[in-house]
Amino acid sequence: MQFISTRGGMEPLPYSDTLLEGLAPDGGLAVPEEMPQVDAATLESWRGLSYPELATEVLGLFATDIPRDDLAMMCADAYADFPEAVVPLRSIGEGITLVGLSEGPTLAFKDMAMQFLGQVLEYALEQRDSVLNIVGATSGDTGSAAEHALRGKARVSVFMLSPQGRMSSFQRAQMFSIDDENVHNIAVEGVFDDCQNLVKSLAGDLEFKRAQHLGAVNSINLARITAQVVYYFWAWLRATDADGPVEVSFTVPSGNFGNILSGFFAKQMGLPIRRLVLAANENNVLDEFFRTGIYRPRAAAQTLATSSPSMDISKASNLERFIFDLVGRDPRRVVTAWRELDEQGHFDLSAEQPRFEGEFGIVSGTSTHADRLATIRSVYEASGEIIDPHTADGVKVARSYLEDGVPMLVLETAKPQKFAETIHEAIGIELEFSPELRQMLDAPQRVAEMPDDEPALRSYITKNALH
């Protein structure tokens, strides 16, 4: 299995080289040269596997350059500290089932991929006797998941950019309380898109990237996308029975388009998915795109601060991977679309819009703060389950796409404790925190504050990077 760039300027690379590269040298994103296929017989043979075993099978289709025994060991280690089920499924009524993705160390779905990424990065660096300086951007959950997966690793340093004042107090504490020497938190004046633009600018400077051994853990890193593919297969296997194949639909709270892109990969691989339902918050650029075919990101000043902050994103990095398939895997058309975006602030693929649902099964919807509160309240009253605001966005939009005989699986985003203020507003309950979480919330915080200034960031990284 080899990987190419969406913009056509990268020689095919194996999996391990791709994950160390992050953004491709031509500014594009790595995608499989050909999508691996899973037939019905193979799918049924996976039904009795544990989560680490299933991860080994699915990831093994992509990571063909890693010996299977090594991959199995990494998958086992990645999920060793999760509960036995790793990803439990829970019905909340109305034909909706939650896919429990928040059982990891930072209580958010990002742990599912990041714990594996920590293992495979360390493995690849040891194989090459090299080091890597991760530069990432987070709107809330990616940063803490990456830092907890990579803290203390001798060959990796993490420089994580976050928007000042745009995360919940829990999210800030989860990141800024880490005191490992290889973790550097940087709070940038601006919004997530400003942080993401800084990361992409550094990644696009090949001389600086090589000199400072820069890599990425944002969902531009293909290992993140492929590791997330696993739980789509896992959830399908638990929501269906051996009499299938049976189609299911997935609803995915979406900001940077990485999580739902993994579902798109799973569907392309042959998993019987009827619909992929994209749930947006008030920053609904992606909902507008899938309804109209016109992609028009908003400026930082127009990116709203909402009560589902991990989705406060107006320029979705992973959309490029979908566009690549939409335009027939023609890198010239991808480059043209992004040039139009740079020149006029949007690109128009409205001629292709009917294919979004018809060919790819992708539909979308928007949820607001009032919707989140009402959904948290209704789910709690009906089932006793307390869901976080992002998952509430998913449930709200999922209700518009329910179909008889088609299970609707909503991907859970995080534990409600991460957004206690919104939970209290919705249902008047003060959530309890374990002694370990309380200690984290009360711990001293370590963060460097910085303007939205690329030279300042370059200087900071040069001073603190591993070599």
Image (tube, rainbow, N blue to C red):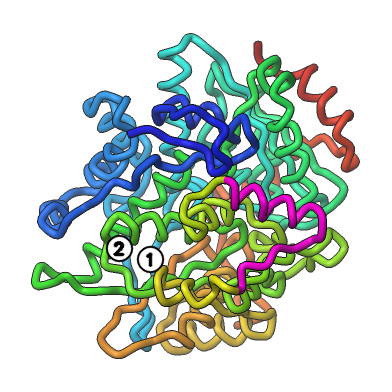
User: Marks 2 and 1: CB-CB under 8 Å?
Assistant: yes
Residue 4, compared with residue 140, is above or below; it is above
**Disc marking residue 99:** 1
Residue 168 coordinates in the image, percent (x, y): 71, 59
Q: Secondary structure at mark 1?
A: strand
Give the quadrant of residue 218.
top right
Q: Which amino acid is tagged 1?
A: Val
Residue 427, compared with residue 126, is above or below; it is below
In terms of secondary structure, what is the magenta stretch mainly? helix
For the question of whether residue 187 can be seen, the reply is: yes
**Disc marking residue 235:** 2
Residue 182 coordinates in the image, percent (x, y): 64, 23
Q: Which amino acid is tagged 2?
A: Ala
Q: Residue at x 22, y 26 (%)?
A: 69
Q: Is 158 within the magenta? A: no
Q: Is 335 within the magenta? A: yes
Observer-nearest of 336 and 463: 336
